[in-house]
Amino acid sequence: MPNKSAAQPQASLFDDALNPAPASPLTENHEPRPAVTAPTGGYSAKDIEVLEGLEPVRKRPGMYIGGTDERALHHLFAEVLDNAMDEAVAGHAKVISVRLDAAGQLTVIDDGRGIPVDPHPKHPGKSALEVIMTVLHSGGKFSGKAYETSGGLHGVGVSVVNALSERVEVTAWKDGFEWRQAFTRGKPLGGIEKLGPTRKHGTAIAFMPDPVIFGEGVAFRPARLYRMARSKAYLFGGVEIRWSCDPSRIQDQTPSEAVFRFPNGLADFLAERVKDIETVTPQPFAGRYSRPGETGKVEWAIAWTPAGFGEADGFMQSYCNTVPTPEGGTHEAGLRAALTRGLKAYAELTGEKRGVILTADDVVAQAGSLVSVFIRDPEFQGQTKERLSSADAQRLVEAAIRDPFDHWLTAQPKSASTLLEFVIERAEERLKRRKDKEVARASATRKLRLPGKLADCSGNAINGTEIFLVEGDSAGGSAKQARDRKSQAILPLRGKILNVASATLDKLGANKELTDLLLALGVQAGSKFKEEDLRYDRVVIMTDADVDGAHIASLLITFFYRTMPEMIRSGRLYLALPPLYRLSHGTKIVYARDDAHRDELLSGEFKGKKPEISRFKGLGEMMPSQLKETTMDPSKRTLARVTLPRAEEVVEALVEQLMGRKPELRFQFIQENAEFAVADLDV
């Protein structure tokens, strides 16, 4: 063992620089030591650049608004609108106007107290208005005296707008007079002007973004401004926001004028989002919380839906002091915790033992959630305030929502039980997916297990192979004899499969016909589907050419559409077209697809003749040679490819109407289309 006391001090990484070896020009390995020379360029006090006023903002705009793209441009509007909203939330403003003129200049007006215009004590010769517009970290929101809660806390919002605008004009109606001052690129064009007496009060800020910063082609989008203004009105029921835009700047359906006023706040916001969507409970869970003497306020609105919200299953939008927080934060954590604990407590109260498996993700996965908090001195991550990090916000939201949610559940037991069952199903799906993943991992090296009734093809390559999903064992027997063993596989299905449009994933997993089908295809259903896992190039549904066969084909198409629509989009799903009739006269034999085709042949090829007509009762009634000739031989058959139209929402509506859980929709369809059914029956 080495003697610790004899250990030498560890050399510093800087030793060579601080204590160069004095003795030899050679190092210990006898290689020449490189010579140390002084840097050629000078570096002194004159190289230290000091950016004054608003120059740092123009030099590095990304540090203040996140960039110079279209999103950052509209952030300027958000900063000005936030200031007006702070006046409204503080109880000093009732009306906010937003105007976009033909030149692209944006103006925000409020009827609040007006920006102070008196001389600033720490900046001789400058008014408070000029200080606010030209000095970073200036404003009335630091001490909490002027604003109990506010969205702008860093004191850089409107001054950043001033710095990044080609021109800004500020008008203040204050102390019985109208005051105005203009700026360009952050610098005043002159002192503040006292224009004359007025009975108005409030502030107007008109600004034109600087093309030097944002580029010549970047301009405000009316549709985006319209949505931002409307969203703000939802966040505070006591404000009215008036929108106007010069018609020459509108290129879509955005109205040129509108008035936003939503007394019910987030409840109105959510009602607009879910107005055409089926919800789990008749009424959303919505409410407000505030107590006299306390600064913290909370508002929320939540609705659950099995249908999802467009491309997403659910969404959560949160706000702090009317500022959107797209990356969430502690207020969202409080909402999730309160909802989860409430549903678990209700499950325990009603004796539902499965409630213990619930997690926050299960509860909000298919919910549309809105939460807004008003707190003093919130802490955000970054100047753009995209995530709230105040620990007090989580405690406030959780305490505000917990009791109202408990009362909401117990007051409507039927809806509460429906919601609990819906959320538990989500949890069970999650556990099943995790179990399937574990099983898949454990069996990854095992031999592929295929259903025993599958007659697989002998070829190893996937290209050119196809699997026929055949109705019944009898038809399966004929198909097995008619197939090309190298490229065609046969999977007989027993009767009508499960209607997945009105069944849960648990029922789907317990259905043997469908699990055998998935095993044969080599894929998993839902989000785990991977097209590259398919064992065949084409999947062909082959059923009898009658009503029952059409029903089975409809169930199978619904199964593929709901569980693996990517397979349909890639053009891999087909329908076989077996004939319904065989017409023969002498040596001539022709097959007819349906009644219409039969009549066409009788009036055409067999006109004036009396052919022998036989009707196939099903695929099992056909000789293997007939089935091969008419339906399975690629050189002679006709297949119908199943496709989805561009407007897939039409397909979803039709599937829900004809195959979904509501029989009244099917009854309505039958009533509306009864005349066609009568015509088909020749009644």
Image: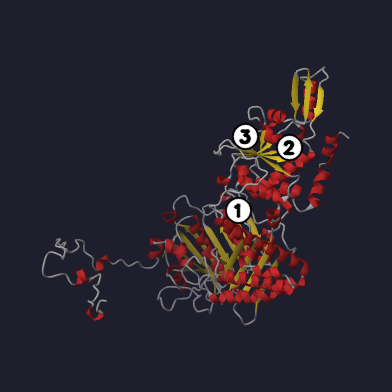
* Residue at 76%, 53% in the rendered image: 661
Left or right of 622 in this view: 387: left
The image shows residue 426, relative to residue 356, as above or below, that is above
Query: In which image quadrant can residue 671 be found?
Result: top right
> Can you say which quadrant of the picture contains the C terminus?
top right
Residue 562 pos. (x, y %): 67, 49
Q: Secondary structure at mark 2?
A: helix
Give the mark nearest the N terminus, 3 or 1: 3
The residue beneath circle 1 is 527
Residue type at numbered disc 2: Ala
Q: Secondary structure at mark 3?
A: loop
The number of numbered discs placed on residues in the rendered structure image is 3
Can see residue 474? Answer: yes
Q: Residues within 10 Å of mark 1 (few under 14, many from 20)?
A: few
* Residue at 71%, 72% in the rendered image: 346
Q: Determine which of the numbered discs, if any, sits on residue 607 in the image.
A: none
The residue beneath circle 2 is 475
Left or right of 35 in this view: 611: right
Residue 329 pos. (x, y %): 54, 69
The residue beneath circle 3 is 485
Residue type at numbered disc 3: Arg
In-front residue for pair 200/594:
594
In-front residue for pair 674/383:
674
Give the mark nearest the N terminus, 3 or 2: 2
Q: CA distance from mark 3 to mark 2?
A: 16 Å
In-front residue for pair 78/475:
475
Q: CA distance from mark 2 to mark 1?
A: 33 Å
* Residue at 75%, 37% in the rendered image: 544
Give the mark nearest the N terminus, 2 or 1: 2
Residue 182 pos. (x, y %): 46, 63
